[in-house]
Amino acid sequence: MSGKSRYSLQLAVLFVIIIFLIILDISSGTVKISFAEFFSYVSGSEDISRQHLVILRDFRIPRVLTAVLAGAALSVSGLQMQTIFRNPLAGPYVLGISSGASLGAAIVVLGTGTLATGIIADWGIVAAAWMGAAVVMFLLLLVTLRIRNIMTILILGIMFSSGLSAIISIMQYFGSAAALKSFVIWSMGSLGDVTNSSLIVMTITLIPGLILAVLTVKGLNGMMLGEEYASSVGINVRRTRTLVFISTSILAGTVTAFCGPIGFIGIAVPHITRFLIGKSDMRYLFPATLLCGIAILLISDLISQVPGSERILPLNAVTSLIGIPVVIWVVIKGRKLAN
Amino acid sequence: MHKQAEHIISLNKLTCGYHGSKNLVSDVNAGVRKGEMVALIGKNGSGKSTLLRTIAALKKPSGGTVTVDNQVNSMIPPYKFARLLSFVESGSSPIENLTVYELVSLGRHPYTNWWGRIKGEDHNKIMEAIGFVGMEVFRDAPVNRLSDGERQRVMIARALAQETSILLLDEPTAFLDLPNKFEIISVLYQLREAGKSILYSTHDLETAFLFADKCWVINDRKIIEGGVEDLGKQQVFTKLFKDSRVLFDEKEMKFIPKRPVKAEIYLKVNDSSSIQWTARALERISYQIVSEKKDAIAEVIVQEQDKETTWVVKFKENTSVFNSLYDMARYLSQINQ
């Protein structure tokens, strides 16, 4: 089989797996909803109880669609960061975007002592987290205008991130027990808090981020061999870098604002995808990483529901716990295969 | 005398270096004509890479200009410049899983659409470039599993896929063994024959002397340019390496290490085919061969009998016979200590 048709088949398989996972994820949860009921809902027939209809419409479908969007956004921004920094440990949060969002959320939850729940408090956290990510992005763009060396930017990003985390720690130390609990829950990540209305806002925000990401594919491909090579083949390195930073800030910042920080996906999915499709060319890697990111976040969400139980595990813990062994396996197995 | 119009690359009172440090080249003029292969020579740290990067518009000059095809390089739009000049950096860190074909296809960037789609014509150019450097059989091989020599050929193919009339290469033969060095330089020479203009930096003077039309020699922040033989005649290379531990043999156009002579030795000349090898072994252990027996501390006679070669060494009252140059050299090294 030629390389291209093998790749097309791989994408098709991934696509089918995603559809299967979406259906499975929608029907799983504390209240069991059968596939038949789900199809009834989709087809508009009335063979579904009122209670199940509400659960599907207001909880399950928004949660699964959030998983699709967040999985795509985080994995794509991770791929962008790893390519631009030429560093396998880079991820969407490496530049401090997650810390910026966390600080925003911390200011609302811990700083104001907001304990109220409901639409205003929820939107307050989302808006503050998004503002936090946006401020970090803005500062980062100012830095990139002055500093050309990409490694210096990476180090500054990491330092920036650590500095913000330190401020959050101080705020946590002085926060009330209830506010602290509420912040810790936010920081554990969740796909279930996104409502239909916030899902619309999230989608509208993520689409330009994804479009920008698609537009950087050619530039990033050239930058695989280094920025000087990219310049020598006519790529505007500074513009590509700026577009990547804006795109990743929109993608990672928005997901963090709505779902809290979700670890592992951004760092690990590009590695898993490289291993699965055996390619580094961004034109192949980009769509495959996007699909892999969706699939893996859906699997994480399914596991976090703990099938057969009424408990829900923190998403961040699940993504890490299922992800770490996978990455270790990929790294060791990949090395062995390469040798 | 320079005639600027004839030059496809021209340095005009160029000064370049790094901000805050001394300029590496200062106020220099030099040129590369169309279809010429020019070797850029200089000691480590003399500014060869910086000069190439300045010509490739990857770095701004501190003063003066670089013109490429009669236009100041920084004034040419990047996508147009990428169709005029390609640059192969020294060393590389190939990406895992990237095949030869995919890497060479990166050279088509100036010609592809926003997504970097490879069309039929691009494919033909890529295959042509891979074929030119003799890597067809490795087309689908991952680049990180190739040898250094093969990888360098792939990097050159990437530059060829860029379809430029000028190629700049920073130390293309670094880290390569002798056969590979010749292979790479032969590929460059074929490109020169095909009408491309080539400027490459190198420490490998022997291949440069054999293939380059002209050398640019960086010495003391200036560029001395000229044909290899002209520069040899003007003792440019001798002066360039005068403070180092090598001597430039102007007759042979090669370098020999500077070694203090330990003693003089007499080598009896006869028609043996081993005389040359014997002389070489004696020089290696720091003996100077003299033609008068009376000045020498020992005498070496090469004897050939029934296709067997033996070496007789007469030292003071002793006569020793050896079956190999290695044994003879060991003995002579010891008696002179």
Image (cartoon, coloured by chain):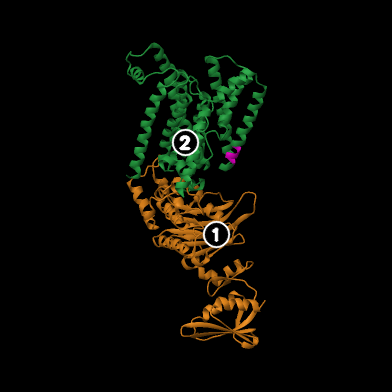
At label 2, the amino acid type is: Val
The answer to whether marks 2 and 1 sit on the same chain is: no
Q: Is residue B16 magenta?
A: no
Q: Chain of mark 2?
A: A
Q: CA distance from mark 2 to mark 1?
A: 52 Å
Q: Chain of mark 1?
A: B
Front residue (pair A197, A68): A68
Front residue (pair A287, B33): A287
Q: Residue at x 61, y 22 (%)?
A: A107
Q: Quadrant of residue B48?
A: bottom right
**Chain represented in orange:** B
- Asked if one can make out residue B154 in the rendered structure from this viewpoint, the answer is yes
Magenta region: which residues?
Answer: A152-156
At label 1, the amino acid type is: Asn
Residue A102: x and y in percent read 58, 26
Q: Secondary structure at mark 1?
A: strand
Specify the principal SS of the magenta part.
helix
Question: Is B221 positioned to the left or the right of B84 in the image?
Answer: right
Question: Is A305 positioned to the left or the right of A137 in the image?
Answer: left
Residue B242: x and y in percent read 62, 68
Q: Secondary structure at mark 2?
A: helix
- Identify the image quadrant of the C terminus of chain B: bottom right
- Mark 2 or mark 1, whichever is nearer to me: 2
- Asked if one can make out residue A247 in the rendered structure from this viewpoint, the answer is no
Pointers 2 and 1 in contact (C-beta within 8 Å)? no
Residue A319: x and y in percent read 50, 30
Residue B229: x and y in percent read 51, 70
Question: Is A275 positioned to the left or the right of A132 in the image?
Answer: left
**Chain represented in green:** A
Question: What residue is disc 2 on?
Answer: A269
Query: For mark 1, does the 10 Å Cα neighbourhood hold few (<14), some (14 to 19), or many (20 or more) residues?
Result: some
Question: What residue is disc 1 on?
Answer: B29
